[in-house]
Image: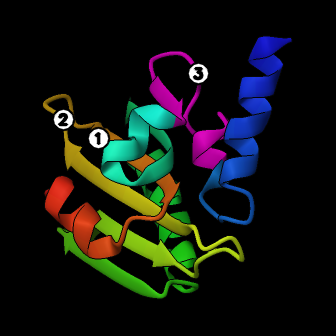
Amino acid sequence: MIILILVYCSLSAQDGLKSAPAFDGRLIPQEGRTETLVKGSQLDRLELSLFHSVKSVISAQTLDEIAALVQEDAKDAVSKEMDIVHGRLSYALISFQRSEAGKGRYLCFQSQEAEDGRFEVILVYMEGSTTIDNLKRKFSK
């Protein structure tokens, strides 16, 4: 029951994002991935109320699928910073419209080629009262 609640909370947090399938297991399988979901007072010093990250080593095809979804999400951004390396999205920091409750919503994407030709990808979704400038200072490329 608790697992179902955590899964529901993590799915609903990214509701409306094109990149949601990367968080919920449809694009990055549960096996071989590291997922972190933190809520509450542990995040106060970062001025966040939610931090959800997924990290995995994936194929070039899966990376391209996720990158395309992140780029679709960027179309709805209030602000965005993106880097393309060798024709592939390698970094994105995206800020969305604040919610009615005043919470900021942020999506972070980073990838780099692994030694075996696959790609290590990290995707992070955050909510909170912080600003994009604070996030840039706390999370560097």
The foreground one among 130 and 16 is 130
What residue range appears in magenta?
A: 21-40
Do tag 2 and tag 1 residues touch (Cβ < 8 Å)?
yes
**Number of residues whose C-alpha sits closer than 10 Å to that of mark 3, classed few (under 14), some (14–19) or many (20 or more):** some
The foreground one among 46 and 64 is 46
Which residue is located at x 48 percent, y 88 percent? 78
Between the residue at mark 2 and the residue at mark 1, the CA separation in whole angstroms equals 5 Å
Which residue is located at x 45 percent, y 23 percent? 33
Report the side of 71 relative to 99 (left or right).
left
In this view, 131 is above or below 47: below
Report the side of 10 relative to 140 (left or right).
right
In this view, 64 is above or below 29: below
Q: How many marks?
A: 3
Of label 1 and label 3, which has the lower sequence position? 3
**Location of mark 1 (residue):** 119
Amino acid marked by disc 2: Ala
Q: Mark number for residue 30?
A: 3
Q: Quadrant of residue 79?
A: bottom left
Element carrying mark 1 = strand
Q: Nearer the viewer, mark 1 or mark 3?
A: 3
The foreground one among 35 and 18 is 35
Where does residue 1 sit, x and y in percent of width and height?
86, 11
Can residue 89 be spotted in the picture? Answer: no
**Location of mark 2 (residue):** 114
Between the residue at mark 1 and the residue at mark 3, the CA separation in whole angstroms equals 16 Å
Of label 2 and label 1, which has the lower sequence position? 2
Q: Quadrant of residue 4?
A: top right
The foreground one among 103 and 19 is 103
Between the residue at mark 3 and the residue at mark 2, the CA separation in whole angstroms equals 19 Å
Where does residue 68 sit, x and y in percent of width and height?
50, 68
Amino acid marked by disc 3: Gln
